[in-house]
Image (spheres, grey):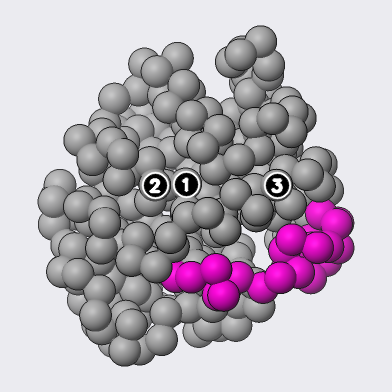
Amino acid sequence: MSAIILRDEIIHYEVLGRGRPIIFLHDWVGSWRYWIPSMQAASISFRTYALDLWGFGDSAKNPSYYSVEQQISLLEEFLEEMGIGKIALVGHGFGAILAMLYAIRHPATVDRILAISLPYAESAINTRLSTDKPAELADWLLGRTPVTEAAWVEAAKADPKAISLSMVSVQNIKLAGLPNQVSTPCLLVHGGSDPAVEALQPEQAASLPEHAHQVLFEASGHYPMLDEPGKFNRLLTDFLSLQSGDSPRQLQLKEEWKRRVR
């Protein structure tokens, strides 16, 4: 286990590979651990980091650090402490919100973003996320299978206040239009059967700016990286392999891409 001390508190992280840095940011339900397959796939060409946010996994449990602002500060302090410069961000749910907000504040630092289950509005977030206990949320969203077992165990480590207080904090953010405020290439991924966060409607996806693109994983729920890992990891590596500044629309992620991953 790797850890650093920030504000006299422990922040847990893990790292794999060598190359340009990628930071993985987890959701309200889970920790760094469910990123392992994606980290392994990307680590062939990149240096991948996944950290536990305040209140999750093996990082410190301190309710004064559970707001969106404090979690963004955590990312800023982590990057400074580790001496990491320009990055790619991969965020899921809550982590996707943090990735977008960080990129808006630090456009010169973020090369690209892959945002999974990014809510387009507060109304797109199922209210169960703010009311159920971590273990109940894990049962609802992850289930108990060999693929999800490790993620389920880690999800139960979360401080319930880390979820509820961050959900309150999200209410103060204008989620609508986040992709429009980010200047860096942004790939949005949603599970077609995600019960926790609604995907953009077709007309909303069609109105995304040129540097943004949505891909729907129709056979996935809230965790496309676990439900369809082969497909997700191929998409991840294709996106990371684009030249800096290239729009994800250049991937042509429709029938042509589907044929390539079979």
- Mark seen at residue 165: 3
The percent position of residue 225, horizontal first and vertical second, equals: 54, 62
Q: Is residue 151 above or below residue 192?
A: above
Q: Is residue 68 above or below residue 59?
A: below
Other-residue count near label 2 (Cα within 10 Å), few / some / many at <14 / 14–19 / ≥20: many
Q: Three-letter amino acid code at disc 2? A: Leu
Kindly report which numbered mark, 1 or 3, lies closer to the viewer in this rendering.
3
* Residue at image mark 2: 101
Image position of 229 (left or right of 90): right
Numbered circle sitting on residue 215: none
Circle 2 sits in a helix, a strand or a loop, which is it?
Answer: helix
Highlighted range, magenta: 120-145
Q: Residue under circle 1?
A: 98
Q: CA distance from mark 3 to mark 2?
A: 18 Å
The residues tagged by marks 2 and 1 sit, at their Cα atoms, a distance apart of: 5 Å
The amino acid at mark 1 is Leu
